[in-house]
Image (cartoon, rainbow, N blue to C red):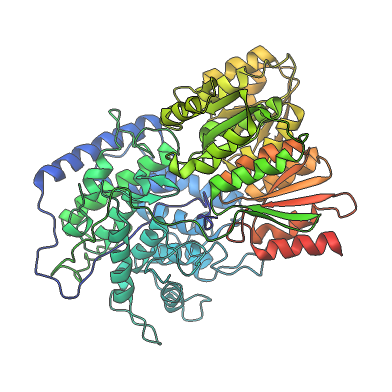
């Protein structure tokens, strides 16, 4: 199974970036880019993107504030004043407490960009909250409790104006730099959870920007920042795709990874259009391909998934970074006129050639198997596709010997959006949810399972358009003798969701569930109980219910509407709009301070059955396929990781729970979790 992804949204703060370039045995060449036509395109793109953000808003006021103040464009009236007032109010209302240290670090960047004083925001010193980080509610937590993020963001925030850290501070710059140097992976990069071997493009880029002011730093045991930067940049160049992008986040060529790498290179004084980062095209040219006519930047080229507000913010920061690089300015996150580093100005290494179909191996060597005792079982394959098939085989145990399936649901294993509403359909059709890859070869286990288990008169439901599940699969299924194939899709995830719901023939007064359509965690937490109860899952934006979804609410006139997630996911406007569409509906919000607590609240509310299915909260494929298993067993589906372990384990009542299923290998759900479950059940 794949290694744990970076926390989303902790994912998710992925707007800080860096990377650099090899410096040994290289020919002399000028590092500053000279492509004036490209610079003109970039300047035009910045202005276009700026206008789009002004008109439509994006995702995070903090990152937007950094970009706006570095853009050189005229800010909206009172923009910085309003931003600083908002942050003062936020700190006062929260009494200076945030669950994540990265919140203090991110807000520091915005406050400094807006001309504020990070040592006095609402009466609180944000810098002290970083270098003396202490969680009064969780005193055992250290600066790295979010993985590498807390450390690298700490450096970046403190270096906005080279702020002094007191000698008696809990965390010094030396501590942070040594931490980064001592947690490199063997391939030369970094990943969020510091697994030791398999790096991540985004985290590597974030880490490198934190090292940009420290090219001459050497740790007491001899580890050099320059060596770390060189190896990381060589790794980034090696894994760059032939088309100029990167395979990351289990997508091919997403804009954020490209943007992050541009920002990191520029912060370290390296040209992102140099030969080392030019394949069929360079990084900047590749990023510009994601921009739409209205100025927005898509996460993926076809706009099929992801949070485009997030990708737009990252893109404008990357373009500003490249423009400033041309003027020999330093990092976009520096506000004290530090000069652009010159360590790498005398030459650039040559890029390793990549083939277009070359991919980074992201699966471990787990076997395709079910393990464990009668009460606690781990279900996993060597990748997400095989795990979905193994889950389907577990469902097969409920069928009579020799009995064939009447229906199967097929959806992409590399994009959650179109399948979020699929769990309820799975329950209704008594069908497994099977994941497919990008091509037939990647998906042979799913195809073989369908051929062996689906009746020739059975029906194949495909969730998503041709860009999500290629027509190649339709052709293959027809060649296998299946004539009853239905593709359910719309122009976007919202329309696809509404079409899936229309398959249910929902009765009047049936309760409905609203989740944020741009993230998977809360939707998966509610997927099993919604399927068991027959409550359709509706996708929404954070602040506004889409028109297609409004029509469903008006038509059904539900007795209850469940809103899943806190104000940061679905704000109060959603409740007001829902109530306006159906005044009789009782609004029930189920939420916690993070995805794990929300998952716990959902399961405590519904408290389904004698079985529990545990899935990773860091990624969606196993939980997506596992929602069919949970609904079939009338089981709870609970998101879990090591940091949420105690509360989630306490949910398991050994006197009531008959079985626990862990979805994924030890790289997805750790041995620590498995051991805790075993102890809870058997003792």
Q: How many marks?
A: 0
- Residue drawn at point x = 30 percent, y = 62 percent: 19
Please state which of residues 384 and 482 is positioned toward the viewer in this rendering: 482
Q: Is residue 158 above or below residue 321?
A: below
- Residue drawn at point x = 36 percent, y = 81 percent: 223
Give how far across and how far down residue 679 sits, in percent.
Answer: 80, 64
Picture quarter with the N terminus: bottom right
The answer to whether residue 12 is left or right of residue 202 is right
Give how far across and how far down residue 300 sits, in percent.
Answer: 38, 38
- Residue that lies at the very extreme toward the right in this rendered image: 655
Q: Quadrant of residue 207?
A: bottom left
Residue 526 visible within the image: no
Please state which of residues 4 and 366 is positioned toward the viewer in this rendering: 366
- Residue drawn at point x = 10 percent, y = 63 percent: 30
Q: Is residue 229 above or below residue 388?
A: below
Picture quarter with the C terminus: bottom right
The answer to whether residue 216 is left or right of residue 254 is left
Give how far across and how far down residue 290 sits, in percent.
Answer: 30, 37
The answer to whether residue 598 is left or right of residue 113 is right
- Residue drawn at point x = 50 percent, y = 70 percent: 131
Residue 262 visible within the image: yes
Give how far across and how far down residue 209 sits, in percent.
Answer: 34, 63
Q: Quadrant of residue 382?
A: bottom right
Q: Is residue 134 above or below residue 413?
A: below
Please state which of residues 509 and 611 is positioned toward the viewer in this rendering: 611
């Amino acid at each position: 199974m794949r290694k744990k992804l970076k926390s989303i949204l902790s994912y998710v703060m992925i707007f800080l970036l860096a990377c650099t370039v090899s410096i040994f045995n290289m020919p002399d060449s000028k590092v500053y880019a000279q492509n004036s036509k490209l610079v003109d395109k970039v300047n035009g793109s910045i202005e276009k993107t700026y206008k789009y953000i002004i008109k439509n808003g994006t995702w995070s006021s903090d990152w937007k504030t950094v970009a706006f103040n570095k853009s050189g464009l005229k800010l909206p009236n009172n923009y910085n004043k309003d931003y600083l007032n908002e942050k003062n109010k936020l700190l006062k209302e929260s009494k200076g407490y945030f669950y994540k240290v990265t919140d203090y670090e991110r807000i520091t960047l915005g406050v400094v960009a807006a001309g504020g004083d990070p040592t006095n925001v609402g009466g609180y010193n944000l810098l002290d909250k970083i270098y003396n980080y202490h969680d009064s509610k969780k005193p055992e937590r250290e600066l790295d409790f979010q993985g590498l993020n807390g450390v690298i963001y700490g450096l970046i925030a403190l270096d906005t104006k080279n702020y002094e850290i007191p000698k008696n501070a809990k965390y010094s710059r030396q501590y942070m730099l040594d931490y980064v140097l001592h947690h490199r992976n063997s391939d030369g990069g970094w990943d969020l959870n510091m697994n030791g071997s398999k790096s991540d493009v985004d985290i590597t880029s974030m880490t490198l920007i934190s090292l940009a002011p420290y090219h001459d730093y050497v740790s007491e045991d001899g580890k050099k920042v320059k060596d770390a930067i060189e190896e990381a940049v060589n790794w980034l160049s090696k894994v760059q795709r032939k088309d100029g992008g990167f395979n990351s986040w289990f997508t091919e060529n997403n804009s954020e990874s490209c943007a992050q790498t541009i920002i990191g290179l520029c912060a370290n004084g390296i040209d992102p259009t140099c030969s080392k980062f030019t394949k069929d095209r360079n990084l900047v040219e590749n990023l510009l391909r994601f921009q739409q006519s209205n100025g927005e930047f898509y996460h993926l080229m076809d706009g099929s998934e992801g949070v485009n507000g997030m990708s737009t913010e990252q893109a404008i920061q990357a373009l500003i970074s490249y423009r400033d690089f041309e003027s020999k300015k330093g990092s976009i996150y520096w506000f004290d006129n530090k000069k652009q580093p010159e360590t790498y100005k005398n030459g650039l290494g040559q890029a390793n050639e990549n083939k277009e179909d070359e991919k980074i191996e992201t699966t471990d060597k787990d076997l395709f198997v079910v393990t464990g005792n009668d009460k606690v079982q781990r279900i996993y394959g060597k990748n997400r596709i095989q795990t979905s098939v193994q889950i389907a085989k577990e469902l097969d145990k409920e069928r009579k010997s020799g009995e064939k399936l009447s229906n199967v649901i097929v959806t992409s294993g590399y994009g959650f959006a179109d399948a979020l509403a699929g769990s309820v359909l799975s329950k209704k059709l008594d069908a497994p949810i099977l994941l497919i890859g990008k091509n037939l070869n990647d998906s042979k286990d799913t195809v073989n399972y369908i051929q062996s288990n689906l009746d020739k008169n059975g029906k194949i439901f495909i969730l998503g358009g041709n860009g999500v599940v290629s027509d190649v699969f339709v052709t293959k299924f027809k060649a296998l003798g299946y004539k009853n194939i239905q593709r359910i899709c719309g122009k976007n995830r919202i329309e696809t969701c509404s079409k899936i719901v229309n398959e249910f023939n929902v009765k009047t007064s049936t309760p409905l569930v609203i989740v944020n359509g741009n993230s998977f965690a809360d939707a998966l937490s509610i997927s099993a109980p919604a399927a068991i109860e027959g409550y359709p899952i509706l996708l929404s934006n954070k602040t506004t219910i889409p028109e297609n979804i409004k029509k469903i609410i008006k038509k059904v006139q539900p007795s209850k509407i469940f809103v899943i997630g806190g104000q940061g996911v679905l704000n109060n406007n959603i409740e007001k709009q829902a109530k306006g569409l159906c005044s009789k509906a009782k609004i029930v919000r189920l939420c916690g301070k993070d995805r794990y607590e929300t998952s716990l609240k959902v399961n405590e509310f519904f408290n389904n059955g004698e079985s529990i299915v545990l899935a990773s909260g860091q990624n969606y494929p196993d939980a997506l396929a596992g929602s069919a298993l949970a609904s079939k067993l009338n089981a709870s589906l609970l998101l879990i990781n090591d940091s949420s372990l105690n509360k989630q384990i306490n949910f398991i009542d050994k006197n009531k729970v008959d079985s626990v299923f862990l979805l994924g290998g030890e790289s997805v759900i750790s041995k620590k979790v498995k051991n805790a479950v075993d102890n809870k059940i058997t003792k």
